[in-house]
Amino acid sequence: MKDNINKIDKDLLNEVSNLENIGKGAYNIRKNGEGIERKVTENVKIITKTDKPGIDIYVKDNTKLEFIHIPVIITQSGLNDLVYNDFYIGKNANVIIIAGCGIHNDHHKDSQHDGIHRFFLEEGAKVKYIEKHYGEGKGDGKRILNPVTEVYLKTGSIMEMESNQIKGVDSTIRETKGELQNNTNFVVSEKIMTHGEQFAKTIFDVKLNGENASTHVISRSVATDNSKQEFVSKIYGNAKSFAHSECDAIIKDSAKVIATPEITANNVEANLIHEAAIGKIAGEQLIKLMTLGLSEKEAEEEIIKGFLK
């Protein structure tokens, strides 16, 4: 890493992107609204956009198991950062993309990052996309993250997305959209924890347009104190297809969780399922751990850790 990466930067990068692994493959690091470091490879090209902030990432056909890191960090209080990143994944390519944003805010102004990521997968391509969000700092300025992910899958392609909100994010609206053609699969796993007065809203909007297209959406969340969460899942079966959406949430204190399923079958052979479960930690779970010598607080922490694992 270059000299313009200080200790706070390194700590943020380690939280959202595993600092030791960034150098393995292509990467682009964005800090306080500007790209500060980049590496490309023979199979992965990263080009700065000329019409708006952001980058275009091109992956060659038949690329196998390469890593691409595109972390964003913000340490400037009061900054409102907006970025557009487009990924073009070639035929039969197989890559792992690690993204995410870490915000350090020690002052009174709000810091915000809105990342709009679009993925265009050619036939037979496969992507595993890992996105982590994290906030820290002593200031009372808010840490705001609003990610938008758009996924366009051509015949036979697969996208697996893992989205984790680690802690410290005061407000987030997370939108994930997908349009799937024949024999495609889109799997989404989301984990969120909120506390204090934090707010988190998730919106999934997936269109199963092709025959044998499928999606599996899993959201697990924990809401504590006075925090509030909303989960909206919209799935449209426009052809012979399959979808399974599930929202599981643990609620504590005066927190509030709302889950809204919307499943629309526009084809007689669309098989769409939605499940939701919201509730407090079961008493028998607490008792079982407390008999092993844990305090009630320690038992709760262990249950939550296992739930979000």
Image (spheres, rainbow, N blue to C red):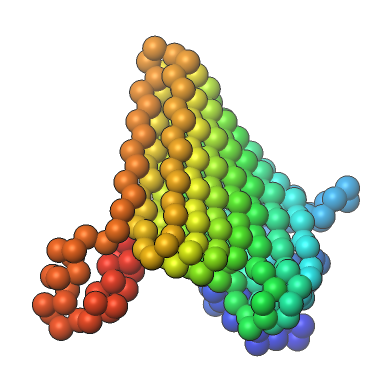
**Residue 173 relative to residue 227: left or right:** right
Residue 235 in percent (x, y) is at 48, 30
At x 54%, y 66%, the residue is 197
Q: Residue at x 57, y 31 (%)?
A: 179
Furthest residue in direction front, as rendered: 254
Q: Is residue 90 visible to the viewer in this orientation of the structure? A: no
- Residue 90 position, x and y percent, is 62, 41
* Front-lying residue, 274 or 177: 274
The residue drawn where x is 60% and y is 65% is 170
Q: Position of 201 compared to 212: left or right?
A: right
**What is the number of callouts on the image?**
0
- Image quadrant where one finds the C terminus: bottom left
Residue 233 position, x and y percent, is 48, 37
Location of residue 99 with respect to 94 vertically, above or below = below
Residue 247 visible, this orientation: yes
Left or right of 100? Residue 243 is: left
Q: Quadrant of residue 301?
A: bottom left
Extreme residue in the right direction: 51
Residue at 72% x, 68% y is: 111
User: Relative to residue 96, is residue 90 drawn left or right?
Assistant: right
Q: Say which quarter of the image contains residue 93.
A: top right
Quadrant of the drawing holding the N terminus: bottom right
Front-lying residue, 175 or 259: 259
